[in-house]
Image (cartoon, helix red, strand yellow):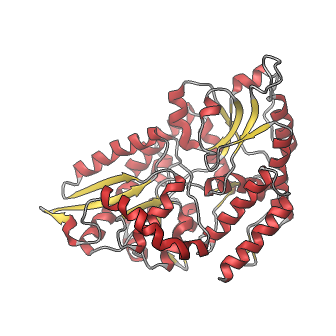
Amino acid sequence: MFSGFCLFYRRQYWIKSISFICIISLLFISGCQNSGLNSDSSTNNKITKITFWHGINPPENREIFNELLIKFNAENPNIKVEALYIGQPDEQLPKIIAGVAGNQTPDVLWYVPQLTGKLVELQALKPLQEWWNNSEIKAEIDPAMLPTMELDNNIYSVPFATNNTAMFYRPSLFQKAGITNIPKTWDDFKEVAKKLTIDNNNDGKIDQNGALLSSGKGEFTVFVWLPFIFSANGEIIQNTQPNLVSEGTEKALQLGVDLVKEKSAILSAPDRGYELDNFINGKIAMQITGPWTLAQLKQSGIDYNVFPIPIINKSATVLGGENLFVFKSNPQREQATLKFLEFILSKEFQTQWALKTGYLPINIKAQQSSEYQEFIKENPVIQVFLDQMKVAKSRPIIADYPAISENLGRAIESSLLGEKTPKQALEEAQKRLDLSITK
């Protein structure tokens, strides 16, 4: 799913807590992985075993991936990829940290590319530049993905798939409320959300809210709110320095505050803004999410459609999706891992993954295939995400991004909960961020 979907920790927390996390999480690692990680014992009987950690969600998508993985293992009898689901966003990062610290990493990691800087800083990754330069698959990959792969002019990861976010809505609820036009601006959005907030039985309790807003400190919350920030001309990096305090960022948070105060929107559970239960059961009419949810929505049998995220100054969205990182091990396992990467990047995998999950393919041949073009015709909601790719921005691939995300997430949550005004929350977040980076 999201892009990314991870809970980033402050840098000082990383340093102070890493030993404790190692003790706890290595219990998980030793219990779930084969004992050959980072040792030659993972290669025996001429079969090279490699371990793949991921957080693919929802469960329907995990089933689809496992089916495709079975095919890879069958077609490569000398390689066996063991895929391990390592949990929801707030569960993943501690296990990754512990694995790096305890030299118990997987061979391949599925995670948002914004972790690149930290993993490079810890010298945990195998650089991929030489392999990339000599790989035939390079010519097939959409150049738009390159910013997510690079740091300091070196390739450290490759894209698994990509996406962005848009506004999903229930057409039946729009029709019932007499709404004929989809909202295009923030003012439109507020007006429509208000009309869709309904007390069905006049008992004084709201039975249906206009929208669900993502709340919490985690990366998914930041991912969802960044398009509003960018639309208002806000930035989180200015003159190469982290900057959370800007008029645009304040406006974006105030939009959320206003919607909550007017009871036109409800907040998600902390760091669970991607869960669709209330959307599926009709308790909310609009929710920001991405094309990775299409398999789940199709299985639910509900009516749904999509429109671009409403704007204030300009159209904006954020480039989403996860990348694949290769950890240092030994030549034989690294070679097997690169073979697995070529499979993920291939036209075959990218086409099937896109058709079955709704993710956008990063392989140009897959994008242009007649099979995928026919899929777009049959699923016109996909076109919204394809069109938004033209304005999609990548989040910074820098070592300080975890601290930026964590502090921005705290400001978003504090504002939405009414604990601080957006301006106060952002100013306090910037102070924490400056202190964190200085330390």
Residue 227 appears anywhere in the view: yes
Q: Residue at x 80, y 37 (%)?
A: 183
Residue 361, percent across and down?
50, 50
Name the residue rendered at 84%, 33% in the picture: 194
Query: Could you say where residue 50 lies in the image, as x and y percent from the top left?
Result: 29, 61
Observer-nearest of 369 and 418 = 418
Q: Quadrant of residue 337?
A: bottom left
Task: Give whichever of 377, 436 is nearer the camera.
Answer: 436
Residue at position x 42%, y 75% in the image: 124
Q: Position of residue 254 (x, y in %)?
A: 85, 52
Q: Residue at x 24, y 72 (%)?
A: 39
156, 99: nearer the viewer: 99
Q: In this view, does 429 lie to the left or right of 160?
A: right
User: Left of 98 or right of it: where is 276?
Assistant: right
Give above or below for 345 relative to 96. Answer: above
Q: Is 347 rendered above or below residue 15?
A: above
Q: Is residue 301 left or right of residue 309?
A: left
Is residue 117 visible to the viewer in this orientation of the structure? no
**Rendering quarter of residue 232:** bottom right
